[in-house]
């Protein structure tokens, strides 16, 4: 294995087309192995570890401009992969979280005796392959194809349970995501090709001087609304609808692949199709900036009203994704760096929260926030991890999410929109309101009926009554270990901020 990696690093361009083949091989293995679940899951985790190692090993070459052409279709239209810092960051997030989520999924599916587990792991691996393809896309055509493959490979996961609710959620999922991509994103790509004669991603963009300000504003809106996976209002309903899926699927949707593919595409188009200078000079980002702000605050307010834990986390995700879209629309270096960093920090924080939600369901079959009183002492590892991840999402130091919120506020000032600082502060306060009450209830409120269980005994031999032990009720180890790993990562990433965004900072233009 070491010799193979050494050979790949001597010719790292080869790694670009090998990277999506690894999850494709894992998908084929999962489909063929059927009921041999130990072997199936062992191969999946091994493939995930190899994929993660490959992504990490590519970082020394992040700025080398490596490119692999898969197919020359027409002049200016090719299927190709290219290595650049933003794409490598997204590929690393998806690859590193894949094996961790696979371990968690094995524990969850077995613990809840879910059906069709081989299909689940096969589709999950296909989704990772599509996400890596999106990450390394060298042009809009390649990205669009991989984007659609991601939608199609995750639809069976959304409908996994096969009941009426799952089928309804799956219809909403497909209708919105396919509808926005075919009805808005594809016309935007065609329009871009007509204007510029290419769909390639280039540093500084390809649309400078190609159209007037009004045209660029409309085109930018088409792109951002057409990227339905970014969940901007009013095209956000697919995400809460998809919460009918098993919790490992929710983790995939919110952290590993789907929504991150959406906001990554927003960032990619903003930086490499339009260019930050073009967005600023044309004013193309101003409309979408306010759409992102409205999405951020409205969905955060809705999250406050949700008693279902997964629904609350779903609306939280929509709100948090809007931070990334806002960073792209502000089109200044600090704000764009925030968006890139938030892709990674939100992924780790939100996957931890969904891991915790699934662990709570597996161990106690509780799905509502109002049912969690007193659960903290029964599931201390789960709720400690939930607390850390919540603090990171809110942006409290020393957790990973604190840096990106600070960068976005600085970016709002740099872009000349100080009012956005107030919007961001309000958004953080709302996130504090819908996340931190959950561990507070779990640790500091008594469990229902606890008072009635106390025996009326006043004569104890040693004076005070002996403390009554609280029985542990954690989920299986395969669920608890991954959520502990990702929670600790929320702390570790606080100290890795510079390393994560330094390569992208060097290739961005503008202030």
Image (cartoon, rainbow, N blue to C red):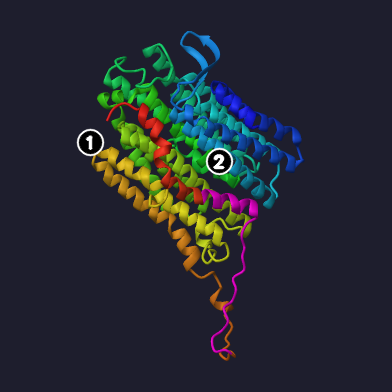
User: Disc count in the image?
Assistant: 2
Outermost residue, top direction? 75
Q: Nearer the viewer, residue 362 or 174?
A: 362
| Magenta highlight on residue 475 | yes
- 463 over 257 or under it: above or below: below
**Which residue is drawn at the image coordinates 34% and 27% (left, top)?**
508
Instruction: Kindly report which numbered mark, 1 or 2, lies closer to the viewer in this rendering.
Output: 2
Q: On the rendered structure, is 232 left or right of 69?
A: left
> Which image quadrant for residue 467?
bottom right
Q: Position of residue 28 (x, y in %)?
A: 69, 30
- x and y percentages locating residue 261 in the rendered image: 49, 33
Would residue 6 appear left or right of 143 to someone viewing this image? Answer: right
On the rendered image, what quadrant is the N terminus found in? top right
Mark 2 Cα shell of 10 Å, populated few (<14), some (14-19), many (≥20): many
**Is residue 176 at least partly visible in the picture?**
no
Q: Residues within 10 Å of mark 1 (few under 14, many from 20)?
A: few
- Label number found at residue 416: 1
Give me the C-alpha separation between circle 1 and circle 2. Answer: 37 Å
Asked if residue 187 can be seen in this view, the reply is yes
Q: Residue at x 38, y 49 (%)?
A: 395
Mark 1: secondary structure: loop
Mark 1 or mark 2: which comes first in sequence?
2
Q: Whole-percent x and y of residue 68? A: 53, 18
Helix, strand or loop under label 2: helix
Q: Residue at x 43, y 60 (%)?
A: 437
Query: Which segment did they paint magenta?
Result: 462-487
Dot label at residue 206:
none
Q: Are marks 1 and 2 in contact (CB under 8 Å)?
A: no
Image quarter where the C terminus lies is top left
Residue 183 placed where, x, y %?
Answer: 46, 24
Q: Nearer the viewer, residue 312 or 136?
A: 136
The disc at residue 97 is: 2
């Amino acid at each position: 294995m070491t010799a193979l990696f050494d050979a790949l690093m001597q010719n790292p361009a080869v790694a670009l087309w090998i990277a999506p083949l690894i999850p494709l091989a894992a998908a084929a293995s999962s489909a063929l192995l059927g009921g041999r679940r130990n072997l199936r899951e062992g191969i999946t985790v091994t493939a995930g570890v190899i994929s993660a190692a490959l992504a990490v090993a590519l970082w020394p070459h992040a700025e080398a401009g490596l490119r692999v052409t898969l197919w020359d279709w027409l002049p200016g239209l090719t299927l190709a992969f290219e290595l650049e810092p933003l794409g490598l960051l997204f590929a690393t997030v998806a690859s590193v979280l894949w094996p961790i989520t696979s371990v968690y999924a094995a524990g969850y599916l077995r613990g809840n005796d879910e059906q069709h587990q081989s299909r689940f792991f096969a589709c999950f691996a296909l989704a990772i392959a599509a996400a890596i393809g999106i990450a390394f896309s060298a042009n809009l055509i390649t990205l669009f194809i991989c984007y659609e493959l991601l939608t199609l490979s995750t639809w069976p996961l959304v409908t996994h349970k096969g009941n009426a609710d799952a089928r309804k959620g799956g219809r909403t999922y497909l209708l919105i995501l396919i509808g926005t991509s075919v009805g808005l994103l594809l016309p935007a790509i065609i329009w871009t090709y007509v204007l510029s004669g290419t769909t390639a991603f280039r540093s500084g963009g390809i649309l400078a001087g190609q159209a007037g300000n009004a045209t660029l504003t409309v085109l930018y809106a088409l792109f951002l609304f057409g990227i339905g996976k970014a969940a901007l209002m009013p095209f956000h309903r697919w995400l809460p609808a998809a919460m009918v899926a098993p919790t490992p699927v929710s983790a995939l949707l919110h952290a590993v692949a789907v929504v991150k593919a959406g906001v990554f595409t927003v960032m990619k188009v903003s930086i490499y199709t339009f260019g930050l200078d073009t967005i600023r000079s044309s004013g193309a980002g101003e409309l979408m900036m306010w759409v992102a702000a409205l999405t951020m605050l409205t969905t955060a307010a809705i999250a406050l009203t949700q008693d279902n834990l997964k629904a609350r986390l779903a609306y939280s995700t929509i709100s948090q994704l809007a931070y990334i879209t806002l960073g792209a629309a502000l089109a200044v270096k600090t704000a764009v760096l925030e968006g890139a960093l938030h892709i990674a920090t939100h992924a780790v924080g939100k996957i931890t929260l969904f891991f915790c939600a699934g662990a709570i369901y597996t161990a106690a079959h509780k799905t509502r926030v109002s049912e969690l009183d007193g659960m903290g002492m029964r599931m201390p590892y789960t709720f400690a991890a939930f607390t850390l991840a919540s603090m990171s999402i809110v942006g409290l130091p020393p957790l990973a999410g604190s840096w990106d919120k600070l960068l976005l506020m600085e970016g709002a000032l740099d872009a000349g929109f100080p009012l956005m600082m107030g919007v961001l502060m309000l958004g953080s306060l709302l996130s504090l309101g819908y996340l931190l009450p959950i561990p507070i209830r779990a640790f500091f409120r008594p469990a229902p009926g606890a008072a009635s269980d106390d025996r009326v005994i006043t004569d104890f031999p040693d004076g005070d009554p002996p403390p009554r032990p609280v029985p542990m009720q954690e989920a299986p180890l395969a669920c608890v270990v991954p959520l502990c790993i990702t929670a600790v990562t929320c702390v570790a990433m606080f100290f890795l901020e510079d390393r994560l965004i330094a390569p992208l900072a060097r290739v961005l233009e503008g202030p």
